[in-house]
Image (cartoon, grey):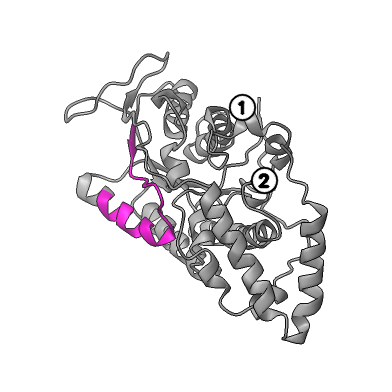
Amino acid sequence: MGIRAPRRSTVALAAAATLASTGSAYVGVRNLLSGQADQARRVIPKSWDVPPRADGVYSPGGGPPERWHRGIPFDLHLMVFGDSTATGYGCTYADEVPGVLIARGLAEKSGKRVWLSTKAIVGATSKGLSGQIDAMFVAGPPPHAAVVMIGANDVTAMNGIPQSARRLGDAVHRLRASGAVVVVGTCPDFGVITAIPQPLRWVARNLGRRLARSQASAVRAAGGVPVPFSDLLTPEFQKAPDVLFSPDMFHPSAAGYALAATQLLPALCNALGERAGDPAMEPALESRSDDATTLLARIGGIGKLWRRTTGVPAPIVAPVTG
């Protein structure tokens, strides 16, 4: 299932952009987008299921994880923070969850025992990262490494791009100050979600790309490593949505999460100084289209369109490596 906009949607978007400068079309454009947001909420289910959890200690050579308790030996402590994509929402089995895939991969590449613990929460935005890190300090010593996946809910909740990026940067700074290396998967691409109709999908994609760029800058400034999920291999999801999306057609499937893990693991290994095959890392996110935000800024009340977050972030887009 591709994401080519129907002709009528393209025409509607062009007409909206043309007429918005008159002021008389503001209400019409806003009503169009508001109606499409309501339609998307009806199509995309709210997250209620509990994602699989498999926290524990992973050893080289595979096998089931050991449930961690005081006294269990480990070499590296990995924590995962963020939203439902960080929890692996949409996965059926624990072995499919991105945190597990990364922990197993890290154990194999490093030859060390990796303790995985997950603080991510379904439906979280950047506003929740501070609480997740607070919970980390309450639970015990900080980890050696942290993976963060966040951003899509900030777009649907209209939290503000500069503010959301700043909150992420603050979270990375706290983690770095605790001694952890930090790898962040930035906001994914809304453009591949066909459940969101056009032109609303165009609006969400544009905002998400702007947020991803701001996130990458904030993460670098705080000493972390940004991994750009958006704009890397979106064609993979366009070509095989039935494989890479879970049944809700919003979250990744196990195969989609595997793509994300193959992008995050090399960055994490490099940050830790472990050998990871030395893959070429992608440069920072760069928009390949005009940042057409003038119209959006002039349509009053657009924030109300997505204010009631669905609790389900957009799918992860990551390249196949190896």
Whether the magenta-drawn stretch holds residue 73 is answered as no
Specify whether residue 127 is painted magenta: yes
Does 38 sit above or below residue 229? Answer: below
Callout 1: 10 Å neighbours few (<14), some, many (20+)? few
Give the percent coordinates (x, y) of residue 223. 49, 55
Residue beneath disc 2: 192
Closer to the eye: label 1 or 2? 2
Asked where in the image residue 247 lies, by quadrant, the reply is top right
What label does residue 277 carry, if any? 1
Report the amino acid beneath label 2: Val
- Going from N to C along the chain, the mark reached first, 1 or 2, is 2
| SS at badge 1 | loop
Q: Residue at x 68, y 75 (%)?
A: 28
Residue type highlighted by circle 1: Gly
**Residue placed at 58% from the left, 33% from the top?**
256
- Magenta part of the chain: 116-135
Closest to the observer: 225 or 211? 211
Residue 160 makes an appearance in the image: no
Query: Which of the image's four quarters has the N terminus?
Result: top right
